[in-house]
Image (cartoon, rainbow, N blue to C red):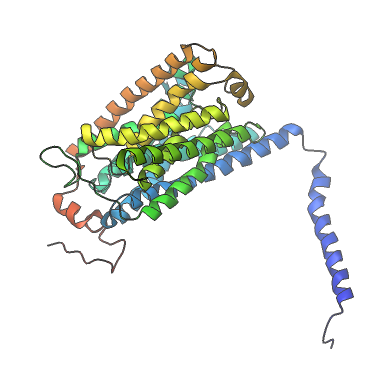
């Protein structure tokens, strides 16, 4: 028996194995190269790219969960996690049942889609049918994003069953109707509204629904004093919130660049650049604005500033230059700080994570910015359209279209979400009891603690 193998034999064996591996890998390419066309390759690349982008956007659910958990108190952490888990789960079923058909079905009066429910019209034996499954996957993660935004604004005092009720209706009806108007060939699409990846379709829908819910729900116990002054209720884990922001920033490259749904559209590179620059500018300007106003570079404001920049650039990301992206993100970073203060101290609407400001207000700003900063050369390359905004000689026409979209979506979402939350309030109950809020929704709603052993709770 040999005690060792000579190095010369080992090297020879390694070369032989390498040649065999290369031959096995190359065989399918040689065998089928004659059957594949450029169009086949393009479809394959586009499908893989769209699914990859969908998976990135799905990972944003983890980002939202971490941000909202970190910005709220430890006694409600499990409740926040459950809401983020279940709005995606319930929303997926709702979007499969009804939402996708309403959003992308055959148009009726420019308002609603009328077929495609249950995905039953898709033929899985054809390339087009298989592409539709990939497209559905990309769209459902967007619907879930709109739904999950609301959980942060209504955190720490919303009953879990009521949140499940809302999650179904926003993914089945409220969000898909807006999506049809703008992305599904509806009346705003016919006017030429540009919302490339969803500053309004996704983020403002979530933000305005959050506003309706937070108003109807009322503030957390101890948030406001009798004289109207506001108390700070600090989140329990800022590092966790920061992790969530980094996850969201990462996932946003799938959100924006993935909205081309085409890996062969090389404008994905420009979109990635504008997305990143706007986020960076938003974080910097929110930090500087908070530093000037409060005397310290507030970490939570800087984190929300990055998200504000990302939300704002989502509509114009394929239509603007890198410099314009920096300006759009910078304005969003300033805007989010003043908006958080205004909503809290003037309107007295309790939003624990700043979701209304980040997604609603900055989503509206980003949508309007298309009418100001769009440049034909960028829009033409990405397929959005050769449109110039006001600052590049295009006049106010596109801005008016964008404003029409922002206003109409606000009216629809705020009204419809208010109805949904009002029904929940009058039937299953919307607000947790004072006792549950004091003890924490983890125990009151789920019968458990997120950090067992760190603190002793009592229900007496």
Count of residue discs: 0
Question: Whole-percent x and y of residue 10?
Answer: 84, 73
* Image point (31%, 23%), residue name: 411
Q: Is residue 389 visible to us here?
A: no
Q: Quadrant of the N terminus?
A: bottom right
Q: Which residue lies furthest to the left in this view?
A: 226
Q: Quadrant of the C terminus?
A: bottom left
Left or right: 170 as drawn, with respect to 349: right
| Pick the front one: 335 or 272 | 335
**Quadrant in the rendering for residue 334:** top left
- Vertical comparison of 23 with 417: above or below: below
Question: Whole-percent x and y of residue 9?
Answer: 88, 74
- Vertical comparison of 303 with 205: above or below: below
* Image point (28%, 69%), residue name: 453
Question: Whole-percent x and y of residue 42?
Answer: 69, 34
- Vertical comparison of 188 with 176: above or below: above
| Pick the front one: 295 or 116 | 295
* Image point (48%, 36%), residue name: 281
Q: Is residue 292 visible to us here?
A: yes
Question: Whole-percent x and y of residue 15?
Answer: 86, 65
* Image point (16%, 49%), residue name: 433
- Vertical comparison of 49 with 445: above or below: above
């Amino acid at each position: 028996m040999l005690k060792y193998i000579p190095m010369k034999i080992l090297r020879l064996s390694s070369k032989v194995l390498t040649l065999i591996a290369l031959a096995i890998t190359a065989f399918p390419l040689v065998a089928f190269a004659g059957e594949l066309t450029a169009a086949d390759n393009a479809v394959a690349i586009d499908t893989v790219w769209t699914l990859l982008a969908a998976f990135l956007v799905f990972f944003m659910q983890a980002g939202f969960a971490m941000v909202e958990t970190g910005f709220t108190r430890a006694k409600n952490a499990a409740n926040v996690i459950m809401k983020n888990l279940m709005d995606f789960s319930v929303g997926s079923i709702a979007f499969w049942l009804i939402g996708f058909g309403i959003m992308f079905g055959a148009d009726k009066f420019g308002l609603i889609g009328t077929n495609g429910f249950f995905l039953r019209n898709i033929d899985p034996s054809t390339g087009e049918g298989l592409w539709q499954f990939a497209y559905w996957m990309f769209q459902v993660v967007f619907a879930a994003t709109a739904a999950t935004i609301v959980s942060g604004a209504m955190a720490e005092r919303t009953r879990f069953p009521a949140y499940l009720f809302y999650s179904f209706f926003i993914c089945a009806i409220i969000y898909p109707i807006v999506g049809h108007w703008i992305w599904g060939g509806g009346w705003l699409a016919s006017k030429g509204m540009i919302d490339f990846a969803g500053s309004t379709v996704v983020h403002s829908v979530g933000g305005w629904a959050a506003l309706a819910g937070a108003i109807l729900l009322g503030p957390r116990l101890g948030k406001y004093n009798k004289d109207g002054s506001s108390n700070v209720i600090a989140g329990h884990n800022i590092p966790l919130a920061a992790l969530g922001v980094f996850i969201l920033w990462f996932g946003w490259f799938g959100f924006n660049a993935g909205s081309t749904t085409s890996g062969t559209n090389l404008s994905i590179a420009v979109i990635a650049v504008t997305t990143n620059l706007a986020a960076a500018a938003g974080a910097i300007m929110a930090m500087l604005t908070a530093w000037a106003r409060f005397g310290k570079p507030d970490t939570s404001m800087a984190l929300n500033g990055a998200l504000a920049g990302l939300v704002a650039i989502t509509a114009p990301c394929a239509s603007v230059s890198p410099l314009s992206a920096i300006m759009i993100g910078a304005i969003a970073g300033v805007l989010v700080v003043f908006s958080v203060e205004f909503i809290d101290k003037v309107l007295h609407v309790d939003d624990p994570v700043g979701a209304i400001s980040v997604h609603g207000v900055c989503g509206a700003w980003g949508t309007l910015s298309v009418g100001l900063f769009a440049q034909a050369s960028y829009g033409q390359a990405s397929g959005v359209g050769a449109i110039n905004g006001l600052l590049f000689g295009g006049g106010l026409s596109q801005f008016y279209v964008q404003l029409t979209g922002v206003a109409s979506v606000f009216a629809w979402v705020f009204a419809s979400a208010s109805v949904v939350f009002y029904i929940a309030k009058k039937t299953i109950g919307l607000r947790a009891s004072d006792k549950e809020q004091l003890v924490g929704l983890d125990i009151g709603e789920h019968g458990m603690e997120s950090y067992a052993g760190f603190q002793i709770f009592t229900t007496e």
